[in-house]
Image: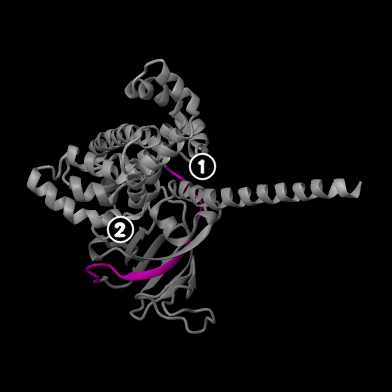
Amino acid sequence: MMNTQIPILKMSVGAFLVRLALIVLVIVWTVPTFGLFISSFRDKDQLAVSGWWEALGTVQSNSQARTGAATDMIERDGQFVIAGNIFPEDSSESVVSFGGGFLPANDSLADRDTTGIKDYSSGDTIELADGSTFTLNKDGSYEWVSDVAIESERGERFFYVAEVPPSFSFQNYTNVFENDNIDQAFINTLTVTIPSTIIPIVIAAFAAYAFSWMEFRGRQVLFAFVVGLLVVPLQLALIPLLRLYGSTGLLNTYPGIWLAHTGFGLPLAIYLLRNYIGGLPREIIESAKIDGASHFSIFVQLILPLSMPALASFAIFQFLWVWNDFLVATVFLGTTPDNIVMTVSIKDMLGTRGDKWEVLTSAAFISMFVPLVVFISLQRYFVRGLLAGSVKGG
C-alpha cells in the first residue's frame, strides 16, 4: 500500500509545483501590465509623486506657486490686498503646509527641511519682514495684505505640501487621439504590418515544404544555413541594406520595408514551418504522389490546410513584431508625416524634452488593441503550432 501511494504523492507534489510556477509567471507578467493600465487613467502630477499601487489612496506632493503681481492688487478697507487661489477651480487638492520662498523661515520647528516647505500649517497667517501678512488656506486660497502698496512685478514664489486624493480620467487617451498624426500612423502601420506578415509566411511555407519533402542536393546544408541566420542580429544588415535601397530607389517606400521585414522574419518562419510540415504523416504525401498529384497540388490541397496551426503561430509572432517595431520602420520608412507609423508617432508625443511621458501609458494600450485582437483570434492555434514537430524532426 505504501509503495502505491508514494508515486501518487510525488506526482501530486510535482503537479502542485508546476501550477505554482505557472501562477508565479502569470503574476510576474500581469502585474506590470495591470499597473500600466491603472497609470493610463492618472494625470501627470499623480504619476510623478506616487506609484500605481498608491492610486486608490491620498498622497502628498511638494510643489510651488506664485502670488499675484502688483497688477492684481486691490484696495480694501484702507489696505492693499493680492488674493487668489493656487488650485484650479475643479481641483480637489488641499494644502497641508507651506513655507520657503519669500516667506520667513521658522527655525523653531524641528521638522523644518531645507526648503522650509513645512514651516507653517494651512490657515496660518505669517508676518513678513516689511510688515505685510500672508495667509494660505486649506482650499488653496491666499491673501497677501499690506498697509502700503505692494510693488511685486511678477509675484512672489513659495512652496507648499498638498494632499492629492485619487482621481481617474480619460484625459491621457484624449491627448493621444488629439494628435494630428495618429490616424495616419494607424493606417500606415496596418499598411506595413499586413504585407510584412503575409509575404514571409507564403515564402516560408513553400521553402519549408521543399526542405521537408523534396529531394535535392545540399538540402540539409542549406537548411542549416537558414537556421544559422536566426542568431545574426538584424542591426548588422541595416547599413548594407540602406546603401542598396539608396541605389535602387526602395528607401522610404512601402515595398522596401516589406522586403526588409520579410528578410528578417524568414529564418524563424522557415524553421517553425519546416518542423511542422516535416512532422506530417508520410503516408499522406506518398498516397497523393501515387494518385499522380504534383508537388504544387500536394502543397496547396494537403499541406496548407494541415499546417494552419503552424501558420497561425508564426503569423502571431510576425504581426506582433512588425506592429511594435520602431527601428526598422524608422530606418527604412522614415519619419515624415505621410510615412510615420504608430511607434514613431507615440515617440513624437513625448515632446522634445520628454515632458509628456504620461501619454505613453494610454498610447501603449491603444497601440496593443489590434495585436490583442489578432492574438485572441488565432490563439487556439498558437500552442499546437509551437509544439507540433518539436519532438519529431524531418
> Front-most of 350 and 247?
247
- The reply to whether residue 290 is visible in this rendering is yes
Q: How is the image coloured?
A: one colour
Q: Residues within 10 Å of mark 2 (few under 14, many from 20)?
A: few
Residue at 49% in and 79% down: 112
Q: Which residue is mark 2?
A: 355
Magenta segment: 151-169
Is residue 175 at least partly visible in the picture?
A: no
Q: Which mark is residue 373?
A: none
Q: Count neighbours of disc 1 (C-alpha within 10 A) and say few if under 14, some if 14 to 19, many if 20 or more.
A: few
Q: Residue 304 appears at what percent x and percent y?
A: 40, 25
| Above or below: residue 88 compared with residue 111 | above
Disc 1 marks a residue whose amino acid type is: Ser
Front residue of 360 and 163:
360
Residue 278 point in image, percent of width and height: 45, 35
Provide the secondary structure element on which disc 2 rests.
loop
- Compared across the picture, whether 14 is left or right of 274 comes to right
Cα separation, mark 1 vs mark 2, equals: 48 Å
Left or right: where does residue 39 sit relative to residue 323? right
> Residue 166 colored magenta?
yes
Q: Which residue sits at x=25%, y=42%?
A: 341
Of the numbered discs 1 and 2, the one sitting upstream in the chain is: 2
Q: Are marks 1 and 2 in contact (CB under 8 Å)?
A: no
Q: Could you say which disc has been placed on residue 390 in the image? A: 1
Query: Quick one: 344 or 158, which is closer to the camera?
Result: 344
Residue 130: quadrant of the picture? bottom left
Judged from the image, the secondary structure of the residue bearing numbered disc 1 is: loop
Tell me which corner region of the image, top left, top right, bottom left or bottom right, holds residue 62.
bottom left
Q: On screen, 115 above or below 331? A: below
Q: Amino acid at mark 2?
A: Asp
In the rendered image, residue 33, in percent from the top left (x then y), is placed at: 48, 48
Between 30 and 167, the residue placed more toward the observer is 30
